[in-house]
Amino acid sequence: MTTLVPYLTVHDAAAAIAFYAAAFGAQETGERDEGDGRIGFVELRVGEVPFYLSDEFHDYGAYAPATLGHSTSAMVLGVDDVDAVYAAAVAAGATADREPSDQGDEKRGWLVDPFGHRWAIHSSPR
């Protein structure tokens, strides 16, 4: 079996954990690596889907979008209710980019989280 797990780098991992919980219902698995006051690794799950998160560690090449001035990738989150999840993310601090709209056989909206990462919130094909 092969898996692919996104690993996001942010400027404030503790604040990001709280944001992802409020915006997307993310839950921390309990695995966390903390060293010098920064979080080097934490696993979060949105539903059954894991993703990893850390603070910046420049000596390991881990830079946050806030440092780079832009995001270098995007996350795509499939949900049952695009409008509700999009609204929750914006209420939790995300910036609306493109409001949810019908895109053929699915609904999709784009936002940027408070840490500079781009997210597409989309429904499964109808």
Image (cartoon, rainbow, N blue to C red):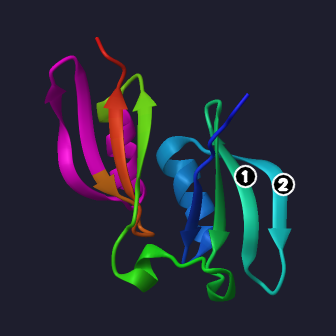
Q: Residue at x 84, y 80 (%)?
A: 35
Toward the viewer: 115 or 93? Answer: 115
Residues at badges 2 and 1 in contact (C-beta under 8 Å)? yes
Alpha-carbon distance for marks 2 and 1? 6 Å
Toward the viewer: 80 or 72? Answer: 72
Check disc 1 and report the residue beneath it. 43
On screen, residue 33 above or below 92: below
Identify which amino acid the numbered label 2 is placed on: Glu
Image spot of residue 11 (x, y percent): 54, 78
Q: Residue at x 58, y 76 (%)?
A: 12
Q: Residue at x 63, y 46 (%)?
A: 5
Identify which amino acid the numbered label 1 is placed on: Glu
Please provide the residue range marked out in magenta.
84-110
Image spot of residue 34 (x, y percent): 82, 74
Toward the viewer: 91 or 123? Answer: 123
Q: Quadrant of the N terminus?
A: top right
Check disc 2 and report the residue beneath it. 31
User: Which quadrant of the view contains residue 70?
Assistant: bottom left
Image spot of residue 8 (x, y percent): 56, 62
21 left or right, relative to 115: right
On screen, residue 97 above or below 41: above
Q: Secondary structure at mark 1?
A: strand
3 left or right, relative to 71: right
